[in-house]
Image (cartoon, grey):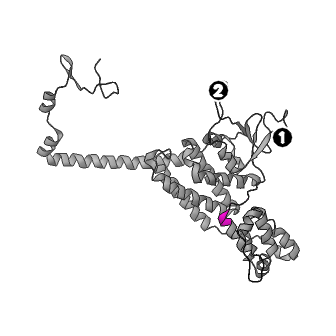
């Protein structure tokens, strides 16, 4: 059977259809044909016009393709899964198939509703940040698109509520820096999808950053009691509930009275002991001229050297009995038989490590 085109089974021979049938093309037949280069030398103006026409057509096609990619990226309505729990297993069998990749788990779990819950918001934001740092290339194309759709909802929630502005700005900056490095390696199958779509997504990130920079926090119109009206002891008690030293610094800039309270050494001491171990603190001791420990300076120095302690109101849990991944307040199939004792709380890093096998 003659080969009509290039095929991996073909010996590389060229066949020509004649009146007598298919024949192999010999070297003499190749020499008899007029080459493209000789034809262009004779008809140089005509070829030049044809080249310009082909270039213009290819340019128009690439422009239309870019416009089509952007239109598809904007027009398709995102779909969010709303499953309360999923089955996780590192191996698949004929009887059942588990969600054994990070992308599948990220797609199936109900993260779109989780960002609306105050208890789960910080957990989801931290998870998005960890994925942006190192796990984005491991996601499938659908999971990467779902990631950007969830991120868009997070930004919109922050713009509406005017809360948690700084963590989202840090998340967007981390994602943008990661994408700048990944987009340069598009030819190495690092990201799934057209380069134009990812460039458009990076433009959206810059636009979100600008919106967050221009956000105006509305002052509450309530005429009731404020924080400065409370006794100093109650104010310090409220400040001890803050787990980020940068929040204390911002609070101290509101008025001189609060600024004095935020310099309390006991306040910064408890903050250091909350986030860091005694061994870490002993390695970074800083003593003032009067012989006192500089707890505030130690906190920021420790923050640059060690990660902060993470604590969330609600987290994902893994049942070691039935391998079900679920939110803490959500029931799963074996809850009735094993109500407690078989579940493990997962931090955002533990959630990612669960699928790194």
Q: Is residue 249 magenta?
A: no
The kind of secondary structure element at disc 2 is loop
In the image: residue 154, left or right of residue 54 = right
Q: Quadrant of residue 79?
A: top right
Residue depicted at 77% across the width and 83% down the height:
290
Instruction: Provide residue 348's location: percent of width, then percent of height.
Output: 69, 50
Instruction: Provide residue 72's location: percent of width, then percent of height.
Output: 50, 45
Name the residue that disc number 2 marks.
93
Give the answer, above or below, for where 28 lies relative to 299: above
The residue sitting at the bottom extreme is: 290
From this viewpoint, is residue 250 visible? Answer: no
Disc with the residue nearer the chain's start (2 vs 1): 2
- Report if the CB atoms under discs 2 and 1 are less than 8 Å apart: no
In the image: residue 4, left or right of residue 132 = left
Residue depicted at 84% across the width and 35% down the height:
338
Q: In this orientation, which residue lies closer to the viewer: 268 or 317? A: 268
User: Which quadrant of the figure contains the C terminus?
Assistant: top right
Give the answer, above or below, for where 315 lies relative to 294: above
Q: Quadrant of residue 161?
A: bottom right
Q: Is residue 308 magenta?
A: yes
Magenta span of residues: 303-309
Q: In this orientation, which residue lies closer to the viewer: 355 or 215? A: 355
Residue depicted at 80% across the width and 71% down the height:
267
Q: Which mark is residue 341?
A: 1
From this viewpoint, is residue 69 visible? Answer: yes
Instruction: Provide residue 205's location: percent of width, then percent of height.
Output: 55, 58
Give the answer, above or below, for where 335 lies relative to 153: above
């Amino acid at each position: 059977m003659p080969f009509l085109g290039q095929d991996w089974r073909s010996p590389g021979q060229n066949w020509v259809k004649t009146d007598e049938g298919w024949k192999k093309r010999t070297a003499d037949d190749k020499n008899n044909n007029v080459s493209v280069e000789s034809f262009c030398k004779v008809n140089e103006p005509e070829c030049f016009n044809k080249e310009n026409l082909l270039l213009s057509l290819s340019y128009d096609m690439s422009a239309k393709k870019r416009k089509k990619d952007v239109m598809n990226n904007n027009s398709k309505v995102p779909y969010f899964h709303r499953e309360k729990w999923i089955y996780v297993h590192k191996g698949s069998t004929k009887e059942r198939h588990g969600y054994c990749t990070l992308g599948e788990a990220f797609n199936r779990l109900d993260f779109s509703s989780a960002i609306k819950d105050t208890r789960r918001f910080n957990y989801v934001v931290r998870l998005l940040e960890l994925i942006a740092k190192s796990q984005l290339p491991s996601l499938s194309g659908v999971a990467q698109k779902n990631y950007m759709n969830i991120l868009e909802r997070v930004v919109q929630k922050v713009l509406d509520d005017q809360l948690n502005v700084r963590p989202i700005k840090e998340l967007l900056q981390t994602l943008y820096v990661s994408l700048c490095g990944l987009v340069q390696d598009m030819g190495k199958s690092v990201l799934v999808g057209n380069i134009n779509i990812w460039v458009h997504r990076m433009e959206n990130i810059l636009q979100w950053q600008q919106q967050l920079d221009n956000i105006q926090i509305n002052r509450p119109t309530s005429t009731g009691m404020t924080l400065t009206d409370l006794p100093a002891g109650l104010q310090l008690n409220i400040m001890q509930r803050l787990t980020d030293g940068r929040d204390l610094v911002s609070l101290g800039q509101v008025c001189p009275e609060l600024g004095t309270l935020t310099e309390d050494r006991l306040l910064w001491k408890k903050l250091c002991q909350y986030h860091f171990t005694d061994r870490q603190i002993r390695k970074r001791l800083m003593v003032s001229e009067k012989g006192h420990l500089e707890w505030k300076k130690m906190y920021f120095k420790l923050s640059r050297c060690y990660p902060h302690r993470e604590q969330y109101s609600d987290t994902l849990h893994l049942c070691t009995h039935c391998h079900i991944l679920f939110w803490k307040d959500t029931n799963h199939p074996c809850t009735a038989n094993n109500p407690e004792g078989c579940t493990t709380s997962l931090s955002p890093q533990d959630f990612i490590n669960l699928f790194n096998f």
